[in-house]
Image (cartoon, helix red, strand yellow):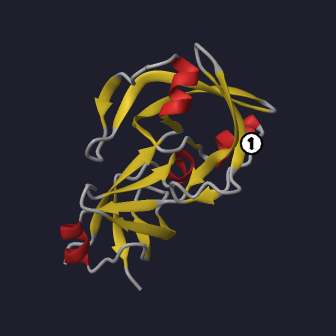
Amino acid sequence: MNNKIIIETSARHIHLSQADLETLFGKGYELTKKKDLSQPGQFACVEKVKVVGPRGEKAMSVLGPVRDYTQIELALTDARSLGLEAPVRGSGDLAGSGACKLVGPKGEVELTEGVIAAKRHIHFSPEDAEAMGIKDRQIVKVEVETNGRSLVFGDVMCRVKDTYATFMHIDTDESNAAGGPKEGTIIVE
């Protein structure tokens, strides 16, 4: 069994609902694709939005397509620098998460929740998950070997879906701590 996984660093970004997109950019606005991402159908956009917290603001890239909810994904370092609460959560687990203000060229949105530090995770195609003996929502460890920064990531959530391509996602803080890993070995206990 091949238990190697490609690791990608996911920088801070925003997923917008259609309603919030239109508030920020104007009625009927549609996202402009800049480049495709590794997950099928997902793309980086030309658009950026300012995320405002008590200590400052940062312009962040928008990822498409639009979602049913608005979600801001930050590394904990970003959250601290902006003065925002960002609990470590899986995507979409927003109840009780951090609040912020979003500023676009046409308007502003005050979010009472939606700011998270994304839980490290692996997207699996069903075929790859079956080949590795992985089940949806299983927790694994991933060992990375880098020059002087080798480590083991614990609490890695596995997500299996027929629309996923198999890649691990970590945030910039995690990537920096491990020296920018490109590959890891999945450890199933």
- Among all residues in the image, which is located at the extreme right? 54
Name the quadrant of the C terminus.
bottom left
- Among all residues in the image, which is located at the extreme bottom? 189
Label 1 residue SS: loop
Residue under the image location 64 percent in, 45 percent down: 115
Q: What residue sits right under mark 1 in the picture? A: 84
Image-based side of 59 in relation to 163, left or right: right
Question: Foreground: 86 or 78?
Answer: 86
Question: Foreground: 143 or 92?
Answer: 92
Residue under the image location 38 percent in, 62 percent down: 122
8, above or below 58, in the image: below
Residue under the image location 47 percent in, 31 percent down: 62
Q: Quadrant of residue 187?
A: bottom left
Name the quadrant of the N terminus.
bottom left
Image-based side of 61 in relation to 126, left or right: right
Residue 16 location, x and y as percent? 50, 35
Residue under the image location 41 percent in, 57 percent down: 146
